[in-house]
Image (tube, rainbow, N blue to C red):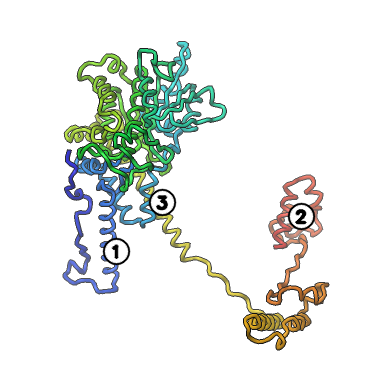
Amino acid sequence: RSSGRRGLCGWCVTGPRPLLGPEMAQGNPPLPGTPALESAEQDLFNEERLAKRLEESGTRTGLRDWVFDASPLVADLVDVVEESEGFRSVMEEVEGAAKMLSDEDWKKFCEIPAERIHTQDADVHGRLFSAVETSWRDFLAKSPKRLRAARKTATFLHVGTSPPTIALARLMAKCGWLGVSIAPRMLNVAGMEDGLVEHMLDPGSLKDDQEFANLIQTTGPNKCGVVPQPEQFQLTFVNAIFGKGYNPPDSDDEETAGVEGQATTAVSDSAVRTCFGVQGITQTGMVRRRLRALRNSLAVALLRLANKGCMVFVWPGLPFHPMLLFLTASLRTLFQRVHLVIQSGTTRTFEVYVLCVKFDRDAIDNPVGGSPGATLHSFVNSACRGNGVDDVLMWTLTEKALKAESKFGGGSKLFANNYEDLWRDYANMIKVLSIELDAMAAVRASKAKLKVKPKPKRLRTGSLAKADAKAAEAAEERDLGETGGASDSDHNSEDIFLATLEKLPQVAKSGKTKEDLAKRDSTIPLIRTRRKEPLRPSRSLPFLATTLGAAPGCAINGPDPIKLGERWPLIKYGWKRAELSALL
C-alpha cells in the first residue's frame, strides 16, 4: 500500500495563493498603511498558518491520528473520499478553524474531541439511538419483560478498557437489565452491586490474554472463562477507549521480542520505534497493545452475543479513519443493520458509535469457507494478531474496497446512518467548537482591554499632610543613620512623631495617651474609621416598601420588625440585609 505524499487535496492549500484585491486587479498595488494592504497581509498570514498546521498533522486534515499513529493511511484515505460532500464539509470547518484560531486555541481544538467522551451516555443510549434505530426503544425497554415472561433474564456484557459509566449503568438497571463488566478497573457504585457483576481483566495486557481466550471457549474445562453464565448475552458493549486513564504496562515477552513502546497515552514523535522490518505502519509497542485490546474486546463481544442481539461499539479514533471503514464493513456482514452515530449539535461529547442490530448467530456457529463468520473467526485467531506482530495496515481494506465502502448507503438506499451522515454531523460539531473557542478568545481580549486601572492614592490635606511629611522625613533620617549618614543626635524621630501627634484631632478623641500611639511605627499613617450609623426606617428605603410599613404615605412608626421577625424568618432575614446595606 502506498503511503507517499501527492500534495494537498483539491480544497486544501496547494501553495501560496495570489492575493488579488480591487487595486491588484486593476494593476495598481495597494499603498502601504492602507486597509487593502493590511487585509492582504492578514490573508497571507492565515494561508501560511493553515498550510503549516495541515502539514504538522501528518494526515493532511489538520487532525492527528494520536490513537493508532497511522497518519499515512489517513492521508491516503483523503484521496479516496475527496468527492464526498460530508468529508468536504469537515475539511471546510477544519480549515476555517486553522486560519482563525490562535496557537493556544488550536491546541485545544485538536485535544478537546479526544478528551470529551462519555459525558452524555444516558441521552445517547436513549434518545439518540431511538431516533436512529426504530426498534431500539422496544428492544431496550421491552426485552426484559418478554424474557421475564419466559423465565429468563435480560443480560448485557460490557467489555473494554474502561467500565460502563454511572449514567449507562443506571439506565440499564432502570430498564431491567442485569450486566457483566470486564475492564481493567471496577466501577464500584453503591447500590448497584446486584445489577452489575464486575471482573478486572485488561484486554490490552499480555498477562490477561489467556483469560480472554477462555471467555470465547465453547468446550473444555475453561469454557466461558470467568463468566460461565450466561453463555450468551442479548446485548454487548465494546468500549475500547484509550484515554489518559488507560496505560497498559509493557510485558516481558514484548521486551524480549524487541518491541518496545514509550509509556505514554498518545503516541509521540519521540516514541521508540522498533519493528521486525521496514514493512508496515505500526512501529511502537503502545499501538500494538491498543490493537490487542480492540481485538480481544471485539472477539468476546461477538462470540458471546445471542442470536438477533445488538452490539454497541465505541470507536476511539478519527471519524474518517480507514480502520473504522474496515470494521464497519466486517460487522455489516454479521448484522442486519449497522448505524454510524454521533451526538450532533453539541460539544459535550465527541465519541463515535457503531450501532449493530440483529446479529446472525448462525454465521458464527456454522462457518463455511469464505463466509463472513469464517472470515471473522480467521481474522481474530490469525497468527498476525499475535504478540509483537499485529499492524494497523492489516486492519484496512484495499483501495477498491475502501472506495466502495465509503460510498455504501449513499442516496438513502438503506435505513441506516452512513458515512455521509457521520461526517456531516461531525462537521457541525467542530464548527460549534471553533465558534466557542473564538468567542472565548474575544472575551479574553475584551477583558484585557477593559482591565480596571488602579485608582491613584488620594492626597491628604491639612494636618494629615503635614504628619505624613514629618513621618517621611523621620524615616529618611533613620535610614541615613543606619547606613552611616546623618547621626541620630541631629534629628530625633521620636520627638518629631510626638510633636506631630499633638496636631492630630483624632488623638484626643481616641482615649489613648501619646506614649501608646508613639509605640507604633512612625511610618504607618493613621486611618480614620467611618462611624456606622444605625438603620432608621423611613419612606426613603424603597426595598422595605409594603413590608415593614415604610411605603410612601404611611406612618414612620409602622409594625415592629423584631416581633415580625420572630414569627416570620423571612422578614428577619430581610431586616438584617437592610441593616447591612445601610451600614455599608
Q: CA distance from mark 1 to mark 2?
A: 65 Å
- Please identify the quarter of the rendering in which residue 281 is found: top left
Q: Earlier in the sequence, mark 3 or mark 2?
A: 3
Residue 156 to residue 469: above or below: above
Q: Answer whether labels 3 and 2 touch (C-beta < 8 Å).
A: no
- Please identify the quarter of the rendering in which residue 373 is found: top left
Q: Answer whether labels 1 and 2 touch (C-beta < 8 Å).
A: no
- Please identify the quarter of the rendering in which residue 102 is found: bottom left
**In the picture, which quadrant includes the N terminus?**
top left
Q: Nearer the viewer, residue 300 or 213?
A: 213
Q: Position of residue 129 (x, y in %)?
A: 39, 30
Task: Name which residue type carries label 2.
Answer: Gly
Q: Position of residue 237 (x, y in %)?
A: 39, 27
Q: CA distance from mark 3 to mark 1?
A: 22 Å
Q: Position of residue 4 (x, y in %)?
A: 17, 45
Report the residue marked by disc 2: 549
Say left or right for 451 vs 210. right
Residue visible at 79% across and 52% down in the picture: 561
Whether residue 483 is visible to the viewer of this picture, yes or no, is yes
Report the residue marked by disc 1: 42
Q: Earlier in the sequence, mark 1 or mark 2?
A: 1
Whether residue 461 is visible to the viewer of this picture, yes or no, is no
Q: Earlier in the sequence, mark 3 or mark 1?
A: 1
Q: Tell me if mark 1 has few (under 14), some (14-19) or many (20+) residues whose alpha carbon lies within 10 angstroms of its own.
A: few
Say left or right for 119 vs 359. right
Task: Name which residue type carries label 3.
Answer: Glu
Residue visible at 45% across and 62% down in the picture: 446
Q: Nearer the viewer, residue 409 or 384?
A: 384
Residue visible at 26% across and 34% down in the picture: 391
Report the residue marked by disc 3: 436
Q: Tell me if mark 3 has few (under 14), some (14-19) or many (20+) residues whose alpha carbon lies within 10 angstroms of its own.
A: some
Between disc 1 and disc 2, the foreground one is 1
